[in-house]
Image: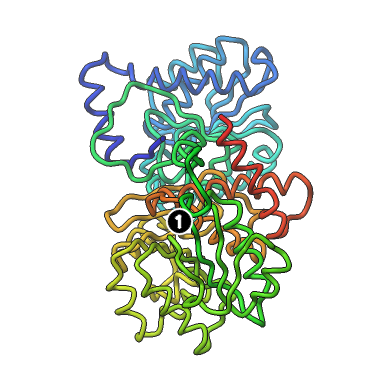
Amino acid sequence: MRAAWRVAQVRAAEETVMKTLPDGALMQRAAAGLARRCADTLPRVYGSRVLLLVGPGNNGGDALYAGAMLARRGARVDALLFDRDRVHRGGAEALHRAGGRLSETAPGGADLVVDGILGIGGQGGLREPAAARVADIAGILLGAPVIAVDVPSGVDADTGAVTGMAVHADITVTFGALKPGLLVGAGAMHAGLVELVDIGLRLDGDPAIYVPDGADVAAWWPRPQASDNKYSRGVVGVATGSDKYPGAAVLSTAGALAGPVGLVRYAGSAANAVRYHHPPVIATEKASDAGRVQAWVCGSGLGTDERAYAELRAVLGAPVPVVLDADALTLLADARLADWLRERDAPTVLTPHDGEFQRMFGGAPGDDRVAAAAALAERIEAVVLLKGDRTIVATPDGRAFVNPTGTAALATGGSGDVLAGLLGALLAGGLQAEHAAVAAAYVHGLAGRRAAEEGPVTAADVAVHLRAAVGSLTRR
């Protein structure tokens, strides 16, 4: 599993390693990695036009040294200086010696643009006059691939916040360690493909976020054993849907059926719809009549009337892990349920989108989605899965994970119902709450991507592709 580190931790690691190296060696390592990626992006280096956007300090220095390496290979390299008085002198001299040009006027075009305006210390978006200069070359930025140096200029490296103008990169070459702002929030959208260049840093302390990969999810995923029966594999209860929203029940049970459990029990007033669409599911009218389960999923399409309230209370009173989604989160705002949630001993996972988060926490997640999810998890002593293009999973003890498989195709009605059902099945299958949440989000994202390859996506399409997504991982 990969990890991303805060700026202060990266700075400390850089200072430590620089004490053991000749002056400038760390920057040369970074520049070499950047130049290699630039060369790989160009159809050919010789004769290509490369435009460097050069800000003050080391970020501009990385761009200038990389530009010098490309110039020595025959590229025409122009450096557009954003602050001539504060340009990195060594990098500027290296580019000049290699035949590159330093100017305060942009050329007419480029085959590649390198964004070295601001580094990981930049906050608050591009300010004037830099913002205006970037706007002036918008045509060049749209017409050529853009590679950002360490972080796209204008993106907060710690949070992913973009509070003003920021560069949209196709590729970000980041040095020494991944930064949270490249993986979450608006920053992830600006970063494009992220490539990590190893420059020899040793990071201390806990990372800001963890980034799971397919091998992690495959290792966690429960697999049936020769001695198993349908009950020993796990039984998940699904208390979702209603007469008004039977589709939520159908979709959440579809998600549960794609999980590792041997049996799915449904409880609710949409029982007939579930029986019709999913014959293997055992359906009853109430949670109290469902029988024994190892985990519950509750909320999707449940409604907020007294019947829904009674069902949620019954689920919260069960001594098993619980997933709370959609209407269950709305009902939690009722003070009558606060003690039921607080007094639970079994794991609880909440799956809010931004609007539900705001109702529960009294404010929107804001620019720092990782911190927001972590604060809610600590406050309610439960795992929080904050849905979004880059879904965040936060634990009460302060750990956070970001899902790398998200896609905008999942922004469709009922998609979260499918996710909740799959998550509940993983809990019933015996996974720890945070692993179940991470694995469900990961596979849900893969299924959304597979569905998107066939055209516009509905939640039913996502459910159909879940099994193939699971199989692609567990066959490894």
Q: Residues within 10 Å of mark 1 (few under 14, many from 20)?
A: many
Q: Is residue 61 left or right of residue 251?
A: left
Does residue 449 sit above or below 226 in this rendering? below
Relative depth, front residue between 262 and 128: 262
Residue 104 can be seen in this image? no
Does residue 410 sit above or below 336 in this rendering? above
Question: How is the rendered protein coloured?
Answer: rainbow
Residue 272 can be seen in this image? yes
Q: Quadrant of the N terminus?
A: top left
- Indicate the position of residue 348 as horizontal and vertical percent values: 38, 64
Q: Residue at x 50, y 40 (%)?
A: 223
- Indicate the position of residue 5 as horizontal and vertical percent values: 34, 40
Does residue 396 sit above or below 134 in this rendering? below
When asked about the image quadrant of residue 294, the answer is bottom left
When asked about the image quadrant of residue 363, the answer is bottom left
Badge 1 is on which residue?
A: 428
Residue farthest toward the bottom in the current orientation of the protein: 306
- How many numbered marks appear? 1
Q: Quadrant of the C terminus?
A: top right
When asked about the image quadrant of residue 107, the answer is top right
- Indicate the position of residue 464 as horizontal and vertical percent values: 70, 52
Q: Amino acid at mark 1?
A: Ala
- Indicate the position of residue 183 as horizontal and vertical percent values: 47, 44
Q: Is residue 242 left or right of residue 385?
A: right
Q: Residue at x 30, y 70 (%)?
A: 344
Relative depth, front residue between 382 and 25: 382
Relative depth, front residue between 431 and 226: 226
Relative depth, front residue between 458 and 35: 458
The secondary element bearing badge 1 is classed as: helix
Does residue 225 sit above or below 123 in this rendering? above
